[in-house]
């Protein structure tokens, strides 16, 4: 009895947030209740994920067939080591971002005027992400994607301001196209193999003619590459993310692209042999790293710089996957965990900067190190971590990936290693630019940038395609004096950010055990049999 | 398995028409395109299920059943398409309220870059200020005034 309850735990990360979302909607008029419900819900999910992590590591992949249908017919959920790690990291990040957004809501809108749709949507997003991580068949993965995408559409256009509708539209259309591609891929896979279950596909793909198998692999990769923002399919990301509210951007940056990477890793290891399309993937990873970071260097807004570093660092994970070796996979798994936390922290900090200084435009910022020392530290540590300065986890992840590339003894892998190191240095440059201009250099009282330099200048002579204005959100204009007199950081926003910053440090401190876990996870991924047996034995 | 040719053609035409519509700038047309593609893909799922048989109910009649799994998938896909379309329509209406049109607007950065190109300006992030002023860069060597105010100055012939 006890055992069967624990078996059903796999369902918890999907079903609990959905229930919570329903409750939140029911109590839409009571902001306080909504907050309590969402916090309790996500805490339960974190607890369930932690238990799953332990059980998946100790007893092998945890499976559950929904409604008792056999895996071939019904929906089955599987938590192996890799899924569980993704799950625990993503739920912790989601919980922290929720706390941050509650803090921000109270600070910005007051206690009485909540956005009643925010919490339910946020919980549904969490359910979608968990479903994508746990699903053991292509179609359920599609459903997971759709759940998280549908809620992300709502979150990215929250409030329906002009800027958000504009950038949200692009995001939604790109997502629609990738969903359509995914559906085509599912139809084609089913026509070719007669199943969508991962475990069955793993054996049946081997029996297909090479041409058909490669075509299906390309279709799936294309779908996931759009979601993961891999070069050349990344252009939607840097435009759409920065305009959303800070917590929304943070959770998107942390989770949504990683779901795409997760799907690539899962299908590459389980369904296909890693060797096919290896060259293509390696090139894609190299170009993602380099093009992404060059974009980041060119930007002059913190959120945009961070969006481009996000694209760029997707390349690292893809590099590990493309290598296909055990060390490469281990590095990729570790890097995903590292990158989710670090990137989210940085976006939360960017939100705090915006709150504190009224803008994230580097041309207008300055002197934050003196103005807000704690904020500066909260930026500095994850930023150095992102750039890969030893001894942080970013360095360790990159080291593992570089090592995997060097061991490969091939010119393309060697190029990848060079690109990885160059990207790391350029990341440091981009981060140092933010640090110098926003935090370190004193704010010049007199120097206001000329109108053409700032993001919110009004266009002359109407916009290009009939739109009235391309202006972004109105920004608080503040002088240095005003900023100094301003109240200090709102603790309700700062404490969650600090907590997440500490988690990133924790990933460094406990890098040994986590690397060990990533090692076991990648072994399990490459062996394939534990997963297949766990799914089909039921 | 031999797929039904008519269904294949139907799916192809629907998806083709949908793609054409999706390439338009108006959000409403894009949505109609999405709906067409979605329905085309449901037909595709039916093709994937193989030859049609009797209704997939156990204990109801003889003969081979249709494959129920793609039907379930198509059903789910229909629901998802409907939800997303509803949201898209609301979005198109909101865009119309805000701007008087539901055209998909350009990427902000593209817009800025295009305007700068029209005015022949350098990018915001083109910084001479961080360079060591004692070392003239090739382009700015003959225009010493340029340092620090590069963004307001029309760049030299090198740009064109």
Image (cartoon, rainbow, N blue to C red):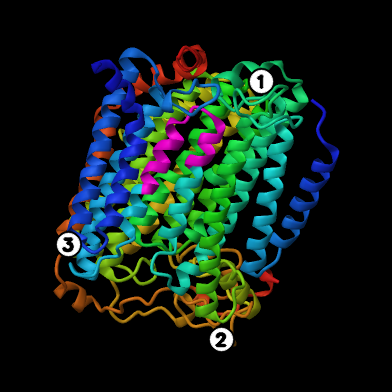
Residue A530, how many percent across, how many down? 46, 13
Task: Give me the residue at 55% from left, 24% from top.
Answer: A73
Residue A280, how many percent across, how many down? 67, 34
Question: What residue is disc 2 on?
Answer: A460
N-terminal of the two: label 2 or label 1?
A: 1
Tell me the tag on residue A205: 1
Kind of element beneath mark 3: loop
Q: Which sits in the foreground, A305 or A271?
A: A271
N-terminal of the two: label 3 or label 2?
A: 2
Q: In the rendered picture of this protein, how many numbered marks are placed on residues?
A: 3
Kind of element beneath mark 1: helix
Q: Verify whether residue A302 appears in magenta.
A: no
Question: What residue is disc 3 on?
Answer: A490
Residue A298 appearing in the image:
no
Dot 2: chain letter: A
Q: Residue furthest right?
A: B5
């Amino acid at each position: 009895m006890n055992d069967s309850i624990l078996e059903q735990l796999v369902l918890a990360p999907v079903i609990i947030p959905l229930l919570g979302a329903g409750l939140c909607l029911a109590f839409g008029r009571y902001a306080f209740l909504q907050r309590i419900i969402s916090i309790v819900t996500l805490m339960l999910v974190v607890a369930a994920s932690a238990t799953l992590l332990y059980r998946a590591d100790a007893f092998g992949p945890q499976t559950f067939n929904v409604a008792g249908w056999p895996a071939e017919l019904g929906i089955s959920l599987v938590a192996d080591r890799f899924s569980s790690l993704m799950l625990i990291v993503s739920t912790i990040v989601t919980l922290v971002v929720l706390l941050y957004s509650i803090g921000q809501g109270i600070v910005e809108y007051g206690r009485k005027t909540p956005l009643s749709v925010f919490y339910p949507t946020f919980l549904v997003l969490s359910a979608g992400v968990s479903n994508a991580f746990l699903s053991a068949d292509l179609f359920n993965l599609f459903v997971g994607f759709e759940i998280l995408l549908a809620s992300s559409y709502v979150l990215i256009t929250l409030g329906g301001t002009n800027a958000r509708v504009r950038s949200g539209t692009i995001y939604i259309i790109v997502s629609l196209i990738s969903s359509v591609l995914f559906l085509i891929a599912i139809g084609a896979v089913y026509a070719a193999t007669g199943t969508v279950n991962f475990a069955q596909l793993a054996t049946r793909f081997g029996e297909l003619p090479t041409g058909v198998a490669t075509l299906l692999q390309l279709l799936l990769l294309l779908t996931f590459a759009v979601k993961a923002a891999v070069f050349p399919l990344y252009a939607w990301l840097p435009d759409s993310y920065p305009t959303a509210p800070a917590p929304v951007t943070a959770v998107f940056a942390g989770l949504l692209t990683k779901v795409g990477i997760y799907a690539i890793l899962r299908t590459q290891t389980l369904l296909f042999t890693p060797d096919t399309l290896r060259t293509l993937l390696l090139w894609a990873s190299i170009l993602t790293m380099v093009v992404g970071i060059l974009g980041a260097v060119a930007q002059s807004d913190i959120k945009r710089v961070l969006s481009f570093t996000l694209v760029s660092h997707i390349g690292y994970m893809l590099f590990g996957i493309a290598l296909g070796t055990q060390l490469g996979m281990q590095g990729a798994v570790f890097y995903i965990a590292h990158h989710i936390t670090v990137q989210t922290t940085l976006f939360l900090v960017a939100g705090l900067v915006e709150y504190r200084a009224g803008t994230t435009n580097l041309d207008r910022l300055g002197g934050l190190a003196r103005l807000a020392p704690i904020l500066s530290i909260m930026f500095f540590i994850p930023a150095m971590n992102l750039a890969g300065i030893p001894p942080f986890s970013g360095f360790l992840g990159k080291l593992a990936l570089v090592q995997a590339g060097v061991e490969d003894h091939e010119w393309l892998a060697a190029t990848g290693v060079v690109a990885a190191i160059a990207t790391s240095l350029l990341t440091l440059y981009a981060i140092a630019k933010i640090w110098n201009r926003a935090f370190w250099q004193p704010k010049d009282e007199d120097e206001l940038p000329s109108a053409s330099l700032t993001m919110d200048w009004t266009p002359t002579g109407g916009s290009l395609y009939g739109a009235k204005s391309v202006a972004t959100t109105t920004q608080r204009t503040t002088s240095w004096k005003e900023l100094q007199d301003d109240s200090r950081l709102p603790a309700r926003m700062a404490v969650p950010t600090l907590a997440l910053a500490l988690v990133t440090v924790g990933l460094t401190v406990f890098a040994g055990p986590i690397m060990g876990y990533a090692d076991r996870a990648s072994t399990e991924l490459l062996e394939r049999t534990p997963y297949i047996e766990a799914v089909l034995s039921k | 398995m031999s797929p039904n040719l008519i269904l294949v053609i139907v799916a192809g035409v629907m998806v083709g028409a949908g793609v054409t519509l999706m390439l338009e700038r108006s959000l409403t047309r894009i949505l109609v395109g999405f709906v067409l593609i979605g329905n085309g893909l449901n037909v595709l799922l039916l093709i994937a299920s193989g030859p049609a048989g009797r209704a997939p109910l156990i204990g109801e009649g003889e003969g081979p059943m249709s494959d129920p799994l793609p039907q379930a998938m198509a059903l789910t896909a229909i629901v998802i398409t409907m939800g997303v379309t509803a949201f898209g329509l609301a979005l198109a209406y909101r865009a119309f309220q805000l701007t008087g049109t539901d055209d998909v607007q350009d990427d902000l950065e593209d817009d800025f870059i295009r305007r700068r190109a029209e005015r022949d300006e350098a990018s915001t992030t083109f910084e001479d200020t961080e360079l060591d002023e004692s070392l003239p860069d090739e382009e700015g060597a003959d225009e010493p005034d340029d340092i620090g105010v590069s963004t307001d100055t029309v760049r030299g012939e090198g740009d064109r």
